[in-house]
Amino acid sequence: MSDTLSNRTVGGDPASGPPVSTKVRHRPSWIAFVVLGSIFCLGMGFWQLARYQEATGTVQNLGYTFMWPFLAGFLVYAYLKYVRLEAEEAESALPAAGADGDDGDDDEADGHPDGPPPRRGARGRQKIVTEIPADLLPTRRPATEARTRDGGLDAYNSYLAELARQDAAAGDRHQERHTT
């Protein structure tokens, strides 16, 4: 496997200058994790196959026999994808000046009045937007809603309030007293 990624063109996109190579950073701890995880998953697959071949084995064990190797493959795939995305991120952090092989004198002639064309990653994609646009989510309705007035409820609440005032004015005489 190569230690560098090059800027490739996708489909009919023309190359925008010499390829920019980025050093791929392989971390020994991640490699050890992927290797040990894959060995564990393959071992679990063989164990499930042995369980299936026993007298008490079920079809579920056979299903797990095929699932565990797929999980081992996914670990390898996820690691490689992570390394590629990390390299693309490092490549996009490189300065854009001179990346298109142009000397920068005639940006207006290229059809880019605001400057050089947008940089593309190793897979030919434009930079990823990392901020949510303000108009993406729907607007919230007001927190206070206009409630319809219920005359009966208002009369009941005022009656209860009047009873509470009367009890407060009467003091302790209306409360039950416990004899000891």
Image (cartoon, grey):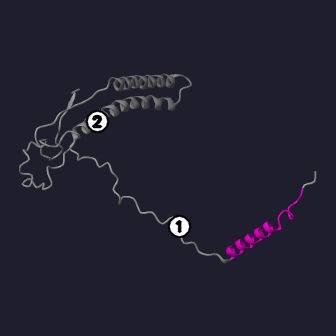
Which residue occupies the extreme bottom position in the image?
A: 151
Q: Which mark is residue 144?
A: 1
Vertical order, 171 against 39 (above or below):
below
Of badges 1 and 2, the one in the foreground is 1
Mark 1: which amino acid?
Answer: Thr
Left or right of 134 in this view: 24: left
The local secondary structure at tag 2 comes to helix
Q: Residues within 10 Å of mark 1 (few under 14, many from 20)?
A: few
Vertical order, 68 against 180 (above or below):
above
Left or right of 127 in this view: 170: right
The residue drawn where x is 17% and y is 39% is 8
Mark 2: which amino acid?
Answer: Glu
Which residue occupies the extreme right position in the image?
A: 180
Instruction: Name the residue tied to disc 2.
Output: 86
Residue 129 at x, y percent in the picture: 29, 49
* Start-end of magenta stretch: 152-177
The residue drawn where x is 25% and y is 38% is 88
